[in-house]
Image: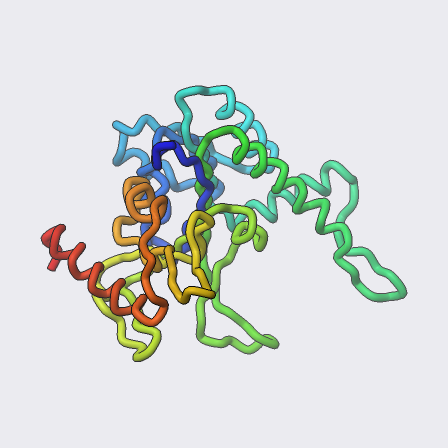
Amino acid sequence: MCIRDRIFSIEVIGEPDQGKTHFSATFPKALFLDTEHKAYIVLQKMPEKGHVWKRVKTWQDIEAGVEWALQQPDIKTIVIDSGGDIRDLALDEWRRRTGKQSPVAYIDGQAVPVLWAQVYEIIDNVVRKIQLSGKYLVVTCRTKDEYVAHVPTGRRVRDGYKKFPWNLSMAIWIQNGITDPKTGKVHFKFYKFGKVIKNNFFGVDVKQGVTYQKPYLFDISYEGICEEMLKPWGPVKLSKVNEQIIKEAEEWLKSKGLI
């Protein structure tokens, strides 16, 4: 099977204006289900792609958009922008369907979130339908401050549906530069890279001490995914991963005339 025949689902994480929507727009002709109501600004700059934009206000809008896209042979990709909103939309839909106000039940005076599984199933049903359809699924994800025991840690974490890292096949985090975990030094901090959070196609062989997964995506685009993440990077010894990725990043930037 050709690498480009591999259909995958991916979450792209990043701060505002880091290029999450632009990344999504590099995919083959897409339906954009836009909960933030601003993706069209990016799409207007890429009219040649032929993307379709739909403003989303309710979960029913998402379901209707997905059903429409699945019947359109020329639509190759479904984009949910932003995935951080879909839990709230699914919760509103659950309330509409059940007539209940909260998915939290009280047992012996204790709050137990037993009905949240029903809310999550609303989301998962749509995700599974897209994944089985032979179309790409791209979900954008915002970030937020991390708190532990109501105290900020100073770190930023993803702000989206918690099951996506498990049931999507890839995840990348757009960030400036590549951080050396040993020294904390940030290399090429004026350039954007995609840190690979998950890649179901390749991973780490712990017994042999090698990795086949590329830790960073240099070309943050559909083309970059096909070239860099759908084929094995290694094998590279785990002890050499950091040196290898910095070396390759420098070579890539030089090949593009960026440094």
Q: Is residue 21 above or below residue 196?
A: above
> Residue 204, image x and y in percent?
43, 60
Q: Is residue 50 left or right of residue 80?
A: left
Q: Quadrant of the C terminus?
A: bottom left
Q: Nearer the viewer, residue 45 or 233?
A: 233
Residue at x-position 30% and y-position 48%: 228
Residue at x-position 52% and y-position 53%: 165
> Residue 140, image x and y in percent?
44, 47
Q: To which quarter of the image does residue 13 belong?
A: bottom left
> Residue 91, image x and y in percent?
66, 46
Residue at x-position 78% and y-position 60%: 112
Residue at x-position 87% and y-position 66%: 109
Q: How is the image coloured?
A: rainbow
Residue 6 can be seen, yes or no:
yes
Q: To which quarter of the image does residue 188 belong?
A: bottom left
Q: Is residue 3 above or below residue 101?
A: above
Residue 34 can be seen, yes or no:
no
> Residue 124, image x and y in percent?
62, 41
Q: Quadrant of the N terminus?
A: top left
Q: Nearer the viewer, residue 75 or 134?
A: 134
Q: Nearer the viewer, residue 56 or 163?
A: 163
